[in-house]
Image (cartoon, rainbow, N blue to C red):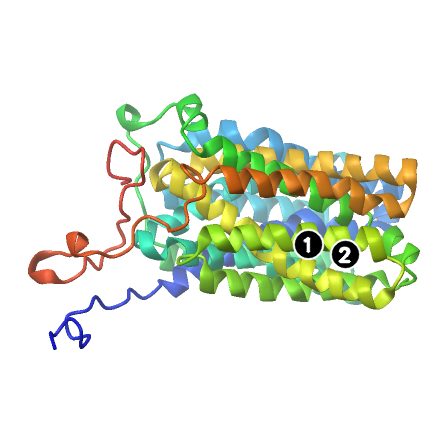
Amino acid sequence: MSTVSRGVGSVPPVRLPWPGLLALSAAAFTAVMTELLPAGLLPAIAPDLGVSESRVGYLVTGYAAASFGAAVPLTAALRGLPRRPVLMGALLGLACADALVAVSSSYALTFAARLLAGAMGGTLWAMLAGYAARMVPAERRGRAIAVVLAGITLALALGVPAGSALAGAVGWRAAFAVLAVLALLLVVLVRWRVPGFPGEARHARVPLLRVAVRPGIRPVLAVTLFLLLGHQAMYTYVAPFAAHAGFARTGVLLAVFGSATVAGIWLTGVLIDRRPRGTLLAALGVFAAVLLVLGMAAGRPAVLIGAVVLWGVAFGGAPTLIQTALVDVSGPADADVATSLQTTVYNAGIAAGSLLGGLALDGGGPAALPWAALPPVAVALTTVALAHRHAFPAVRTGAPSVASRGPGGSADRGVRAEPCPGEGRAPW
């Protein structure tokens, strides 16, 4: 028996840089909390600012609009700068915006602070996945991105309810002050535990249009758009749909969904580096099946709860799978630009999905919601099934091989990932 077959000559697994990845995950958590917290505090914020609850709702809209509009131009403008200072600057901007919201008594100033927060959030979203990809070898890229994006899931499942509870106990301004302090602490943690990477040299930068038309980019963006269309059409109006199903406790249903997304992100982290395509097909297939069941048997509360559990598991892992596919086809060096495009598409999907759900609700009542959400999810599933050549391969590139070992047969233990297909240069 050879030494390799006994495991003596096998390549040892590369440990994930947990402190740095968890810092990035906490940044994702903070950005989601900053974006969504006002939605649960409308009755408390409105009298303090002297406006209606609907105008307070525009604070969430303003954040999304700024994120939508700023992600691409800011990412393009900053791509030549060292990555860590840009990341720290975006977190500092979030801290300033949350602090302004905490102390402002003017609706105009509060709205301006939310626009600043949205611009900083868009910059963060464009960076986080690419940053995680650069911190690990290519074969661990999917798991690293899953760790970072778990911050989104935790914010939705635990953070937003906890923030609303904190605001109820000590006031909504204190909740935003806590977010500002958290963002400041993350600036220090990023400087301490997140490695620095250089920006792109001017002569090496791939123009935005060339990144956008790279093989595989458009299918990934299309899946992002259609998945969010279907999800948001259903999720935005889950309260009237639950009432239609005879289950009026919407808070319980949302908690079940949030808990299931945690399971989904964990399961994705286990499978993503080994079976990315199969895992994404399964997630989208389960989501489509859930919508079909909800459309046919929504009147039973037990069916509704079981379907929401499966929906949460499927949707919890899907964004990480899609994000990893995008980083793979763009290459870590251009991931920030590609992700800025995805951020724009993501926010467009949220807005269009909410509109689609509203039209379905007005036209056919709550029972029409699953049938309105099903076609875009089916389109996303079909796109993944057909786009296997460039965008969604069965096996991710970058797996360890004899050719990738360093002198003496040992694996390269550094953080430099292998170039992705279509890359004409090393990622960094």
Rendered residue at 86%/43% (across/down): 368
| Picture quadrant where residue 358 is located | top right
Q: What is the C-alpha distance between the residues marked 1 and 2?
A: 7 Å
Q: Quadrant of the N terminus?
A: bottom left
In-front residue for pair 263/107 = 263
Q: Quadrant of the C terminus?
A: top left
Q: Which residue is mark 1?
A: 176
Give percent across and percent down for residue 53. Answer: 87, 44
Rendered residue at 57%/34% (across/down): 222
Give percent across and percent down for residue 2. Answer: 11, 74
Give percent across and percent down for residue 61. Answer: 73, 37
Q: Amino acid at mark 2?
A: Trp
| Picture quadrant where residue 400 is located | bottom left
Q: Is residue 30 visible?
A: no
Rendered residue at 59%/43% (across/down): 381
Q: Amino acid at mark 1?
A: Phe
Please tell me how many numbered marks the rendered image carries.
2
Q: Contact, CB < 8 Å: mark 1 with mark 2?
A: yes
Q: Secondary structure at mark 2?
A: helix
Q: Which residue is mark 2?
A: 172
Pointer 1: residues within 10 angstroms few (<14), some, or many (20+)?
many
Give percent across and percent down for residue 109. Answer: 72, 36
Q: Is residue 376 visible?
A: yes
Whether residue 363 is situated above or below residue 37 in the rendered picture: above
